Image: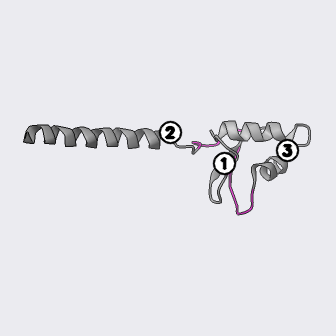
Amino acid sequence: MLKIIVCAVVFVLLFTSFLLMGTYASSNNPVEAAKGEQSIIVHTGDTLWDIAKRYSDGSQDVRYIIFMIKDRNQLQTSQIIPGQKLIIPSI
């Protein structure tokens, strides 16, 4: 009986550690800005719309720039938080 309990505890610990490693490995933080890209830190009050307008040259739709920023930073939603690092792709 004790052997079964020990095996169950070891299994739970291993399962939890693999689960945590997977969560950490899939975090939404971009690695580094490539050549032609810019790295910024989100400030209080910033929105993706504001950031996209700031880095737009005026020739592209702001919605497309938002899409590019979300895609480059692996963002599932448009929610960003102060202190978050974003990479602005070359536009």
Q: Do the residues labelled 2 and 3 touch (CB within 8 Å)?
A: no
Label 2: which secondary element: loop
Q: What residue type is labelled 3?
A: Ser
Q: Which of the numbered marks, if any, corresponds to residue 56?
A: 3
Q: Which of the numbered marks, if any, corresponds to residue 30?
A: none
Q: Which colour scheme is used?
A: one colour
Q: In this view, does 41 lie above or below 18?
A: below
* N-terminal-most mark, 2 or 3: 2
Q: Which of marks 2 and 3 is in front?
A: 2
Residue hosting label 1: 86
Specify whether residue 34 is painted magenta.
yes
The rendered magenta stretch, by its main secondary structure, is classed as: loop
Instruction: Report the quarter where the N terminus lies.
Output: top left
Q: Which residue, as the protein is rendered here, is positioned at the far right?
A: 59
Where's residue 2, x and y in %?
8, 42
Q: Residue at x 21, y 43 (%)?
A: 9
Would you identify the image quadrant in which residue 63 lies? Answer: top right
